[in-house]
């Protein structure tokens, strides 16, 4: 297929990403909210509310809610960074290692950050192999500044079927 006939990547505006992620039912009903998103998509902040909807019998936030809060954000950020560069990719979280350090009975936040090096490594790997995998760290911190959850997230990207990678 020639380059001129390849499907274009879906490019979302920041406000569209914010609202898509805020209204996504698995996040909405777990009281997980995307609070902010940098213009360059290299950082976002997520809040996990402490609510009757996500509280366990001990009064702390369910582990499943916390896991859900780590799941979609880094792949979505990377997918859209590359879409804005004209690359149609598939992106998902391939694996996650979650360490629950302390139960939390307050709201929490997670700051997801990408670096220029992360994007450069992804571009190189996608150009060479058509796919990219990288473990990235993240932490859930309660409102007292205590790290309650540490996570390692394996982000997976690959070029979209039928779409050549020109990086």
Image (cartoon, rainbow, N blue to C red):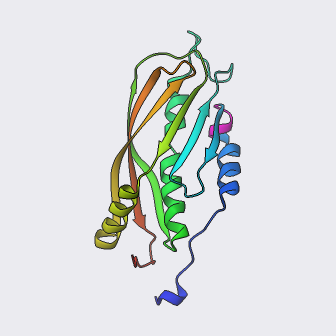
Please state the total of marks drawn on the protein image. 0
Q: Residue at x 68, y 23 (%)?
A: 53
Image quadrant in which you'd find residue 50: top right
Above or below 70: residue 128: below
- The magenta-colored residue range is 26-30
Please provide percent x and percent y for residue 56.
Answer: 58, 16
* Picture layout, residue 81 above or below residue 1: above
Give the main secondary structure, helix, strand or loop, of the magenta stretch: helix
Kindly identify the residue that appears in the image at 32 percent across and 68 percent down: 124
Picture residue at 51% right of the left edge, 62% below the top: 81
Q: Is residue 112 left or right of residue 24?
A: left
Indicate the position of residue 36 as horizontal and vertical percent values: 63, 44
Residue placed at 68% from the left, 37% from the top?
28
Task: Find residue 93 and report its horizontal and vertical position in percent.
Answer: 44, 48
**x and y percentages locating residue 119 in the rendered image:** 40, 60
- Name the quadrant of the C terminus: bottom left
């Amino acid at each position: 297929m020639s380059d001129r006939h390849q499907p274009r990547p879906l490019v979302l505006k920041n406000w569209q990403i914010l609202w898509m992620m805020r209204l996504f039912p698995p996040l909405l009903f777990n009281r997980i909210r995307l609070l902010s998103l940098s213009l360059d998509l290299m950082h976002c902040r997520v809040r996990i509310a402490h609510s009757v909807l996500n509280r366990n019998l001990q009064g702390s936030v369910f582990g499943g809610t916390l896991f859900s809060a780590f799941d979609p954000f880094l792949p979505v950020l990377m997918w859209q960074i590359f879409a804005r560069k004209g690359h149609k990719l598939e992106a998902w979280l391939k694996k996650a290692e979650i360490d629950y350090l302390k139960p939390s009975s307050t709201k929490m936040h997670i700051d997801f950050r990408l670096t220029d090096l992360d994007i450069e490594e992804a571009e190189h790997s996608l150009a060479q192999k058509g796919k990219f995998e990288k473990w990235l760290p993240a932490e859930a911190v309660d409102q007292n500044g205590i790290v309650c959850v540490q996570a390692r997230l394996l982000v997976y990207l690959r070029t979209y079927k039928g779409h050549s990678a020109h990086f």
